[in-house]
Amino acid sequence: MSYFIKKIVCLANSRKVSGRCIAGKEIENKSIGSWIRPVSSRPDEEISEEDSRYENGQMPKLLDIIEIPLKEYKPTSFQKENYLIHESYYWERKGSFDPVQLPGLCDHPKKLWGGKLIKDTNFSSYQGLNDRIPKSLIDQVKASLYLISPTKLDILVRREGAEFGDEKRKVRAEFTYNDIRYILPVTDPVVERKYLANTDGNYAINKPFNKIFMCVSLGLPYKDDFCYKFSASFIGLLEYQSK
């Protein structure tokens, strides 16, 4: 089967099922274009380590500039950024994106998905805040990926299911964007590992605005008929002290 190449700057490399969700913005003729999310033919479309490994054995990192062989454009009703990878070819790293230019890559939605009543309790899970939308609303969604810079950011580490016998610890991001508060799961594996190594608690980040960038993603419908939002990556976060 023939293939074509898309070049992206990697802005998300988050855990998903047994693999990763990798996404970025297209680079074409030195200009930045639309979001691209490479997906596999697996039921949950995750990218495996073998799928994304470079020929030299290295794995993609945030801000890598990557050329990805693709078979076809494969959008869903609301994940219009999806392209099916060609698994027979290596991805190729072509350089690194200058983080100084990240503000120019930011998106500026009024809110991170949801209907007119975003503060309605139906848009929040038991442990989250404004962290989901009903499946019935996904046809209104125009994009499932955004790069933003929050105006306030805390990282939360806690045992969320202790009262139900689940002692596993979770990491979430509590942040403010356009005067709306969100609490979303962290699926950035590097940030997740760093904060799980700490004790439980709330970690306030010193300088989030225009210094720390987040990729937020809207996932596929879950079995409870909601689509959940995720903090898929953080760029710049680990450079700042937490207190």
Image (spheres, grey):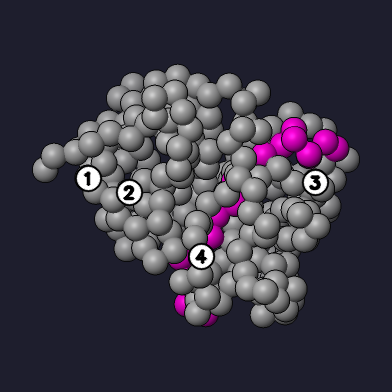
Task: Say if mark 1 contacts mark 2, CB within 8 Å.
Answer: yes
Tell me how far mark 1 sits from mark 2, CA to CA. 7 Å
Tell me how far mark 4 sits from mark 3, CA to CA. 24 Å
Location of the C terminus (image quadrant): top right
Residue 151 numbered mark, or none: 3
| 4 or 2: tag closer to the N-terminus | 2
* Amino acid type for the residue under numbered disc 3: Thr
Tell me how far mark 4 sits from mark 1, CA to CA. 25 Å
Q: Residue furthest left?
A: 1
Which residue lies at the image location 39% right of the left edge and 66% below the top edge? 77
In this view, 89 is above or below 143: above
The quarter of the displayed image where residue 164 is located: bottom right
Q: Nearer the viewer, mark 4 or mark 3?
A: 4
Name the residue that disc number 2 marks: 83
Name the residue that disc number 1 marks: 71
Q: Is residue 204 left or right of residue 30?
A: right
Tell me how far mark 3 sits from mark 2, CA to CA. 32 Å
Q: Is residue 9 left or right of residue 208?
A: left
